[in-house]
Amino acid sequence: MATANTEEEKSKSEQQKNHGGGGGFTRWAVLAVIFRLILIYFPGNLNLSSRPEVSTPLTSIRRLAEGYWLKQSSMSPYAGSMYHGSPLLLSVLGPLTVKRTILTYSVANAELKGSLVTFYAVGCSLVFVLADLISGILIRATGWKLQMTYRKSLKSLNLLNKSTDSGGLSSGDIAALVYLWNPFTIVACVGLSTSPVENLFTILTLYGAATGIAPLAAFGWVMATHLSLYPAILIIPVILLLGYGPDAPPSKLFRSKENGKVGDDTSSQDIIFSWGRVLHLLVWTSMWSVYVLVLCSISVKQHSSLQEMFQRTYGFILTVEDLSPNIGVLWYFFAEVFDFFRDFFLIVFHSNILFMILPLAIRLKHRPCFLAFVYIAISSMLKSYPSVGDPALYLGLLGLFLDELADMQFSFFLFCGYVGVSLLSPVMHNLWIWRGTGNANFYYATAMAYACFQIVLVVESVSSMLNHDRKLMKLSASKLQK
Amino acid sequence: MAKVEKKEVAAATPPWKPKPRPIVRLGIVLISHSLLVSVVCCTAGIVALFLLPMLAKNTYISENALMPGSASSMLSNHDISEAERLAKDLTSLNSGAADAGIERRRVLAKYLSDLGVEVGYHKFQSHQNQFHPLHFFSSPDSGLSRENGSCSSYGINVVGIIRAPQADGKEAIVLVTPFNFRKNSSSEALSISIGYAVFSLLSRVSWLAKDIIWLVADSQYGEYASVASWLRDYHIPVFSASSSHNADSCFEGNNINLSREESPGRTEISSGFRRAGTMAAALVLKVTDVKGQLEDTLSVYAEASNGQMPNLDLINVVNYLAVHRQGLRVKVEKFLSVLTWEWIWVLGDTLNFIGKVAGSLNPEWKFGISTPDYVEGTATLASSLYRQALGIPTGPHGAFRDFQVDAITLEISPKVVYTNQGRRNEFILRSARLIEGVVRSVNNLLEKFHQSFFLYLLTSPAKFVSVGVYMIGFALLVAPLPLVAASLYVDANKPEPSSQDPKQKLQINFKPWKWLSAAKQVFTVHAWGVFVSLLPYFISQIPNSTPAAHSIIWFSLSTFGLLVLYLITKSPSKPQKGKWENLKSLTISAVFIGLLLMSVVNFATAQIGALVLVPACLLAQPLKLDIRTASLKTFLRIATNVFISFVAFPPAGFFILKGVNEGFGNMDVGEFWTWLESLWAWNSATYIYIGMVHLPCWVLCLQILLHSC
């Protein structure tokens, strides 16, 4: 009892300490929001919403406005091949875009038009700024939860070195700030792509799962899957998170520790997989899915159908119909491939993601949050329409594991690579599209380099995480000998 | 237990290390010998730069469809006498009269409509080039400002369009002759004669497959501005009536409403904007008086903004027809001062000798080049590099390149100022036949120019260095940067011996990546660079001040900003081991990325920048360390470092270059401002390079030099 009390006190004092560091976090988060607002105030010169890096066919706000316009004029929002997003997003964001579009075409006076457009663009982008801010706060909360449980489990293994306890920001704070200040996030937010909203739901899923709130996790997962399909694979980390609890050292360690103490193999206590919470999650998931589907069908029933919605959203994602250039690797490939091989390669590329799910889940089942990061990184690499919103998400999540990944190799190389590629890619695009001296290969080369850097990032982070586990094993083994 | 221990020992000291993959081993070898590699590579890079005139290839016409010179010229003396009549009518008008300009325009329009072609006036307002820091990354129209200028600065271009009898009007060829309607100039009248002679012929021929547009550009506000505004209106239609309405109101105020003028000729003079199809190519024709020439010469200017060049085939066609059909001497610009440098001649002699020796060893090796050729090639190459690096177009053709149209300026200068009508007619005939031949070749094109090179440097009108050759030298020059950065990084982040201590090893340490603080420093300095490059926009708004005052304000504000940043970000912690190595490693990485980017945007700038920045970055080492171990080597290094960091400071470098070329006598602080202003007014990427790559890296090098380690 006494020990429990002291532990509680300790955690309280740690909480306070975190709040002390929270001053720094709040300041920087507010600065990030102000920075976004300043950028939103100067939209004309940046012209970000038409950049191929920011707006893909799925995330472009202009397509959303077009879809809303079609819907308003009593047509299916999916008529033509303009809009490929969710009907719910259309209902929420559509009214914010419509004033803007109407004014753009109707107001004759140029100056007046300029000021009004900025005014209404603010209405739409405020939603995205808010989404970013909430995402940052959720990442911070998730990180805090992860750190607490991780330290607790390290303590129970007697591995935590109290003297080297870091005095600065915690990894959750760092992750949230990395997310908020990442140029990719800022560009995606200011460029009015819908990816901040999609990212918000993915983060919400992880937060719900990490804190054990099954309904929230289910809601986040259903919404994220509904908006962009790829988060569907996150169901595995979510189940693991709810079943085993947040990231911990390998379960073998706990077992061997028990063995060392008791010296008896039979009384080993496995970490219990709580089926109750998973069932809870599944029930909530089905409820939310039905709810979302009903909402969608209400939204589209006048001029189209649910079947058309699935065809035009998921079907569009899976069949890679739009081959306009983006930062991914698929557009070039499917522009070149012969038509009769197309289906085959579609299956190959999509199953690439699915193939990696199971092995990774087995190897990293004790670290479900990290598993989720790896899944997100892989899917953003093999996505059909990637945008800068995707690296923004996984780089933010990467910050959650800073302590474990401190020995990561090539961190410097990767940093320089990401900076170089993200600068080179717009220049190559300019050379190809506007100046005509380059060609598609120039731009595609940067896309391939970017894909390589992502692969190196995933491989290195996974291997350094495994190394970290090995180190823990070694340490606990040597502790046990003493 | 014992088993576990054994395992532990085995893990701690593996008996054999797994061999890394060959590519990793190669990388490790290169990184561990980075000093040797960087010396070899840098030297090779600089040597390769001086070998370029030798490696230049002869130009050849790559596109078969062009077929230059395969048809005989159809130009007759009748066309020329008509053209001369027009020129006389234009020059005979009294230049002093206030409405002489309007009258000349009317005469020209009458002649054109007599030919039976469509004629139109294009009204434009010349406005100052604005500072658009992000213009480079956006489309040509997004940076456009259509603000209301004053009515005083307007110009009127005259446009004639021949509709091709054989075609659907989807393509066009553009001829441009700059002409100042307000002034009488014999050479400009001559260029109008040549243009009209060609145009009148083309209005009769049956083989045209592309429309011909003749733009007589009103050059009273500069040749470039008029062509650029015509092109903008051609490509970017204005749907809101506000802008053109504005210009119209100006004309009405001045009582020269051209649109309601009655038509004097066969066709109507249209008030609206006339268009033909997409432009296949454009030729800008100018005649200049240059004294003391041995024969009629043709100068070709090709550099557009940011060092972009037209397709090499266009230059090839012009060069082929001028040399082989019309007997003109073709020139491209060169630095005459290079011809007087002794050491270039010595270098040329040496290379000539080496080439001869190699040729005597094996007759297959034919890379010898005669000394005068080499020196001429170097002078032309230097000028080509300089013009591309500046990023300022060398003539009105630059405006076309912004719309992906291949264009060159042909500047024809007669041997003497012709007084004899017969000689004058012959000159017009030759020039007009040249233009006719080029138009006929371009007319044959099925697609837009794409066969030949876009990225090249000229070493003479008939010789070029392609991108595949000059990139090797540049790649060699910058190759040491990633290697040295990697080796420094490895040195700085070696596991410290104390961490091998078993006590430490037993704990899980939460330590951040070491290089992050250096990255923060590099980032802040680059943010400062952005601030410095945006400052001129605000400084130039200050009314009534001289360039010198501008420079001083700019300099002091920048220094102040740097001081503030330094005070904000100064870390209170004591300097730790490996800190300057990390800083240097990150600086070098930033330079590498910056140079790589710039080499894609504008190769010439990157090449010149690399010649300065690469040695500066590689040699930088804290002066304290060098002073501590005083020896000849370190002394030399200190001297070089101080010298390079002085030269690499942009204003210092500018004034030194200027002093070397023009003498140190009359220096003005404002000149640097004027030079930079010209760069940003033309939206040159070189300006962004200087502000966001060169200057921050120079500051970082200084920080490394002054590092307190």
Image (cartoon, rainbow, N blue to C red):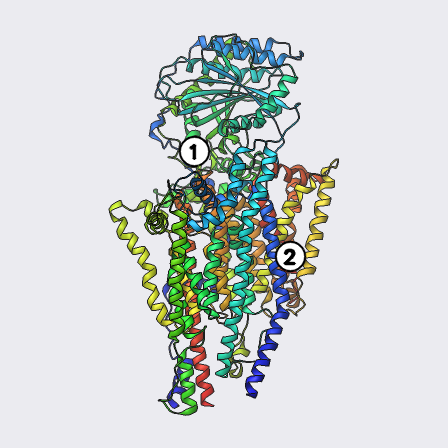
Residue appearing at x 59%, y 38% in the figure: A114
* Chain hosting mark 2: B
Q: Please tell me whether residue B305 is drawn above or below residue B701 in the rendered image.
A: above
Q: Please tell me whether residue A414 is drawn above or below residue A38 in the rendered image.
A: below
Q: Quarter-wise, where is residue B152 in the image?
A: top right
Q: Residues within 10 Å of mark 1 (few under 14, many from 20)?
A: many
Q: Quadrant of the N terminus of chain B?
A: bottom left
Q: Please tell me whether residue B450 is drawn above or below residue A265 in the rendered image.
A: above
Q: Is mark 2 on a helix, strand or loop?
A: helix
* Chain hosting mark 1: B
Report x, y in % for residue A280. Answer: 40, 70
Q: What residue type is labelled 2?
A: Leu
> In this view of the protein, which residue sits in the foreground, B248 or B139?
B248
Pointer 2 and pointer 1 on the same chain? yes
Report x, y in % for residue B77. Answer: 44, 9
Q: Quarter-wise, where is residue A349 in the image?
A: bottom left
Residues marked 2 and 1 touching at CB (< 8 Å): no
Q: Which amino acid does label 1 sit on?
A: Leu
Give the CA separation, mark 2 to mark 1.
Answer: 42 Å
Q: Can I make out residue B686 in this image?
A: no
Report x, y in % for residue B515. Answer: 55, 65
Q: Is residue B207 left or right of residue A26?
A: left
Q: Residue furthest bottom?
A: A263
Report x, y in % for residue B535. Answer: 66, 45
**In this figure, what is the number of numbered marks?**
2
Q: Can I make out residue B149 in this image?
A: yes
Q: Which mark is residue B312?
A: 1
